[in-house]
Image (cartoon, helix red, strand yellow):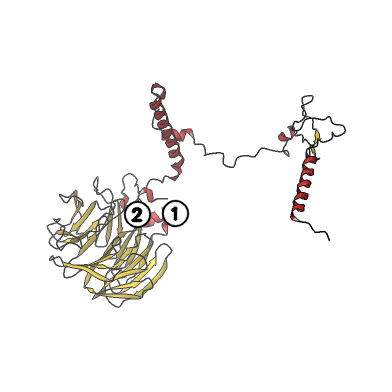
Amino acid sequence: MTTWCLDCILAALFFNRFACDSEMGKPSAPVKGNKPHKRGKLPSKQGGKKVPQSFTNADGVKIKEMEINNDDMKRPGGVKKKKKLFPGRKPVDPKLVEKYTKGEGVRVKKFKNPVKRYKMKRKEAMIKAGEKDTARTEILLTESSGHLEAEEGTYSSRITQQEIREAVDITTAAKSFDLTLHEFGPYKHQYTRNGRHLLIGGKKGHLAAFDWLTKNLHFEINVMESIHDICWLHTEQMIAVAQKKWTYIYDNQGIELHCLKRMDNVLKLEFLPYHFLLCSANETGFLSWLDITLGEEIIQYPTHKGRIEAMCQNPYNAVLCCGHSKGTVTMWTPNSKEPVATMLCHPHPIKAITIDPSGRYMATAGVDRMLKIWDARNLGESLSSYKIRTGASNLAFSQKKLLAVSYGSMVEVYKDITTDGALDPYMHHNGKGYISSLQFCPYEDVLGVGAYGGVSSLIIPGRIPDKVKN
C-alpha cells in the first residue's frame, strides 16, 4: 500500500489542473463540410434568408443554429404573442364623461413661465382624471328616494296599505304585517339601532322580542306585572323593562338578569348608546342615570315639575328633554342639578315630544290641539305651528324629516313639515284601537305602530335617505 504525504498530494493536484488548462486552450479542429470561423460569430445571411449553421465550441460540443419561420407566427397553431392579462383601466364612455365635465379648462400655452405652465398642465390633468373617475363610479350612485304620487284630483293620504302591498315587490310587501294581540294591550314597541330586531311589551305583562324581517322569535314571556315602558340596551342581547314597582333587565332568552330597585315607579325609559347610561323618569318627577357597565346609579335629580308623561333624548348630544304639565320643556344632563334649558312651548300640558335623528328639529304637541316645530339648537320662537284635529298622543321623526302623528286610533304622516310646511297629510292609517307608541324603523321604509289591539308595520315610501338605498 502506497502512502502519500501532504506535499505529494498538493503537487499532484497542481499538475493535473495545469494539464486540464492546457487542453482547454487548444484550438478545436474544424468540422468536415464546414468552413472554419471565428468563435462567437455566426455565419451571415445567404440569399436574403438566414441559413442554419453548425459549429463546435472549445469544449468539443456541437452547436447548431435554430431557424425560426415567421410564417408560423401567423398560423392558428403557431407560436402567438401572449396577451396582457391586465391591459389597463376600463375605457370610459366620452358621453358619460361630458356629463361630469367641469368646462373647457385653461389654455396652458398662454403661460410664458415654464414653471407655471407645468403646474397648470399638471392641475388640468388631475381634473380630467377626476372627471373620468367620477364617470366610472356612477354605477355606485343610488337612486333617488321614492314617494307616493297621487293622480289628479286625489290625495296620497287616501292610498291604503293594501294598495301599496299589491303595487310593491314581494320583499317589500313582506315588511308590512299586523300582529293581532287583543288580550294584553295596549302595546309599546322599539326597534334596535340597526333596525333588525323588534321588542314589544303589553300593558298587562306580555313581553316578546323577535327578528321582524325573518319573523324568528327570540323569546316570549309574561312578567305577571304591568309594563310601563321597554327599552333595548347596547345590543339585542339585553333589554330593560319598567314594570309595576321596579325596573328589570332581561336577556334575549327572557331570563331575568337584574332587578334595579333604585329605579322604582318608572314611566319612561331611554338608553344613551354612546355613554352606556340607562335613563328613567318616574311618576314622582325624578330623573335617574344608571351606568349599565358597573350596575351603579350615577345620579338622581328631582325635576320639581310633577309627573313626567313625555320624555325623549336628543340623539346628537344625549340631552334628555322632558315635557311637563305646565307646557314647559326642560333639558337635562347628568352633571347639572338644574335644567340646562327651559322653554315654554304651550300654554297647556304637553302630551308628546320628539327630536329628529340629526338633533336639529324638535316637535311638541299639547292638549291645546297645537303641533309646533322648534329649532333645537336655537331655543327661540317656533319655526311653524299647525292646528290638528285633537291633542296628539305620540310623535316620531324619520331620517328624512317625515313626522308621524297619532291621535286616538289614527296615524298621519306629514312630509316637509320642517321646511316648506305641510297643509295636508302625506299618508293616513286607521289603527287597531288606541295607539300607544310610534317609531320609524332605522334604514327601512317602515313605521311601527303599537296599539291596543296589537302591533302593525306600515310601509312609508321615501322614509330613508338616498345614501342608505341599495
- As helix, strand or loop, the secondary structure at mark 2 comes to loop
Residue 320, which numbered label?
A: none
Viewer-proximal residue, 2 or 271?
A: 2
Asked which quadrant contains residue 213, the reply is: bottom left
Q: Which residue is mark 2?
A: 460
Instruction: Answer with left or right where residue 265 lies relative to residue 431.
Output: left
Viewer-proximal residue, 157 or 320?
A: 320
Viewer-proximal residue, 114 or 151?
A: 114
Q: Amino acid at mark 1?
A: Asp
Q: Position of residue 311 (x, y in %)?
A: 22, 62
- As helix, strand or loop, the secondary structure at mark 1 comes to loop
Q: Position of residue 345 (x, y in %)?
A: 15, 55
Residue at (79, 24) in percent of width and height: 47
Q: In the rendered image, is residue 240 in sight?
A: yes
Task: Tell me if mark 1 has few (under 14), some (14-19) or many (20+) residues whose alpha carbon lies within 10 angstroms of its own.
Answer: few
Q: Amino acid at mark 2?
A: Ile
